[in-house]
Amino acid sequence: MGPLKYIVRRILWKELGAIVLICGFWVSPVLAIDVDLTLEQAHQILAAARGPMEKASSNEEMFKIIQLADKATRVGDDPAIQPCGTSAVLRTKTYWFEYFGREEGRRSKVAQTEVRMPESKVQEILTMPNLEIELGLCGQEEFFAEGAEVALQQGSKNIMPIDKGNPSRGRKIPGSDMDFVSRFSARFSYQDLDPKAPTKIVVFFPDGKLISLDVDFAKIK
């Protein structure tokens, strides 16, 4: 780890600790995201997501189904309503089964024959060890997100990702002269987090700016 990255990481931990002291402890109970799914549950989720796509009467209807599904796994701002906002999509095991279920339905409809994902892929998702989070950020210049770090905060515990992509170059929002959107993904080990605990996603920028999003696992399976 280079000296600059080490300093940034130390500052990140210091800032996150300060947030805990300011915000205190959360006490609202939440349900858990589904970390341990059975094979039967996986096929039930695939079928439930596949059905509406197979019944859709047009591409527009299928697109609406996909849009609604995306909202169910997103926290923060809705890009369709607030383009220059902060949001995160949580890609859990259930997310991936629902995603591939919709793909099965769409491809079956196009091919006019039953299309199903291989059982090997089902098993791969069942044993996924990590929660993937895709973040959408907004700033006022192309490279505003460069050097951004992210962590999960559960009470007094700060959880760093096991892997993180580099933020994309900012894309100008149509109709705006100075607002840019950047995205990047990070993966967190399920072993490091409590799927039942109230959680915050904290994004830290090199200039000291902090953004946090509350996550209610009761709404995201």
Image (cartoon, rainbow, N blue to C red):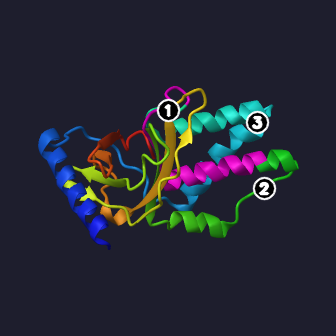
Q: Write down the quadrant of residue 192 in the picture.
A: bottom left
Question: Disc 2 to disc 1, how far (Cα)?
Answer: 45 Å
- Residue 102 forms part of the magenta stretch: yes
Residue at (70, 35) in percent of width and height: 63
Q: Which residue is mark 1?
A: 178
> Observer-nearest residue: 164 or 101?
164
Q: Nearer the viewer, mark 2 or mark 1?
A: 1
Q: Which residue is mark 2?
A: 115
Q: CA distance from mark 3 to mark 1?
A: 42 Å
Q: Secondary structure at mark 2?
A: loop
Residue 62: mark: none
Q: Which residue does the numbered mark 3 point to in the structure image?
A: 55
State which region is magenta.
Answer: 80-106
User: Vertical placement of 30 versus 206: above or below?
Assistant: above
Counting residues from the start of the chain, the first of labels 2 and 1 encountered is 2
Left or right relative to 152: residue 44 = right
Of residue 178 and residue 107, the one placed in the foreground of this image is 178
- Amino acid type of the residue tagged 2 in the rendering: Val
